[in-house]
Amino acid sequence: MRKGRRFAILLAVVLAAALTLIGGRAAPAAHASAKATAKLTIWVDNVQKPAIDRVTSSWGTRRGVNVNVVYHSFGSIRDDLKTVKAENAPDVIVAAHDWTGDLAANGLVVPLFPTKATKKQFPAYALSAFSYGGKLYGAPYALENVGLVVNTRLVKVPKTFAQFEKEALAFKRKSPDNIALAVPQGSGGDAYHMYPFFSGLGGYVFGHSRNGALNPANIGVANKVFLKNATLVDKWNKEGLINSKIDYGTGKNAWLKQRAAFWITGPWETDSLKASGIPFRIVQLPKIKFKSVPFLGVQGTMVTKFAAVHGVGALAKDLVANEMMKPGFQLDLEQANLRYPANIVAGKRVSDPVLKQFGKAGIGGVPMPNIPEMGSVWAELGGAWVKATKGAGATPARVAFATAAKNIRAKIGGG
């Protein structure tokens, strides 16, 4: 009897051990199956892919998500999102902030709700760049803006606009091959690079409603303050400080060959600046009548409407509004993207001296308006600068900008 009991107990132990081994082998398969059911697809450009691969791999392992980071040409992401079939659609995209109004109005992206602590790590203007109708639709990760690049071998770094103007014109007079300022325009105009002069004279594109949203009915291209200061544009044209015949290639070449001591450009020229061997400093264009702040381009990530369709809506929002807004992720992208991080904590950790200077030059900048009506502005505003600074036969600035504002209103009204 005792032997029978011992045998029964031994048999029970052996069976239990066997079941444990079977369960131990089965568990990973069940886990893999669970992971396979949660798949999240991200569209990124080549530049961001390595950094996003790293952060999403770690996050995906922790959350049990299979993250598929797919290369998609940045220039076609917005348009392709409008036509892609749901089964092939991304759950998350990298995006430019000025897509926000278009994508949000079409219901293609969804609002995000990061914590207050997370939002405090970002400048208000970086968050507003991805906001539309009072809601946040994107997590900013990089800032981009132009600055005044000064060849410190040829001129001093100006502290006032009067000093800048004096130094630039004095350099221009030294040789018929010299130009005062390498700021690109060309026949098509360039409202983006010219914006520091526009803001410095009191110009703005759209005003804001009481709720903080951009108001396309409030067009500031020819507001009273700007028109009062517009005679300075005529002065700059007459003395040759600004010449709209200079396009991007001409301006860059002039600075690199030291035929221009001042160049307005952005961080996309970081490698060229470093390779030039020219000593330089990057600053914000000095105040004219007002602070001469640049336009800001803000890059970020957005959650698409397809995330909910694919059953990963909550996961996508956690990735974008939490993980991708952390300083570590933003620093990873800074190094890959050569753009100043939007996260303030990450910004303090930037070690690249050129990016640090561009970042400082962008303080207080104005995000390019992210509403669809901005499409009616670019050509008109850039064209006004071309007409007013083309040298002999230029249109008086008051007339050029008043005409531009009138045309913008007509385009928006007709749209």
Image: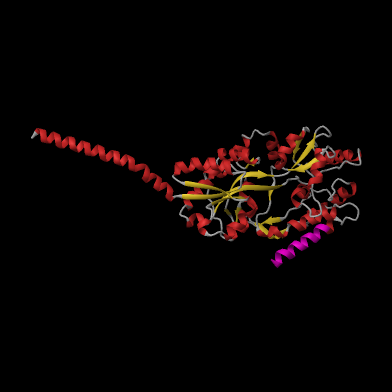
Tell me if residue 65 comes above or below residue 3 in the rendering. Answer: below
Secondary structure predominantly adopted by residues drawn in magenta: helix
* Residue numbers of the magenta segment: 400-415
Residue 240: x and y in percent read 88, 46
Front in this rendered view, residue 364 or 312:
312
Left or right relative to 321: residue 368: right
Residue 110: image x %, image y %? 54, 55
In the rendered image, is residue 194 in sight?
yes
**Residue found 80% across the figure and 49% down from its top:** 247
Q: Does the magenta portion include 412?
A: yes
Tell me the residue at 49%/50% (across/down).
40
**Can you see residue 220?**
no
In the image, residue 101 above or below residue 167? below
Spot occupied by residue 32 in the image (x, y as percentages of width and height): 40, 45
Image quarter of the N terminus: top left
Dividing the picture into quadrants, the one containing residue 84 is bottom right
Which residue sits at x=77%, y=60%?
A: 405
Q: Is residue 355 magenta?
A: no
Rendered view: 268 above or below 307: above
Q: Quadrant of residue 213?
A: bottom right
Count of numbered tags: 0
Q: Position of residue 224 (x, y in %)?
A: 79, 56
Depth check: give the residue in front, 22 or 216: 22
Q: Quadrant of the C terminus?
A: bottom right
Q: Is residue 199 left or right of residue 107?
A: right
- 284 left or right of 16? right
Residue placed furthest toward the left: 1
242 relative position to 326: left or right? right
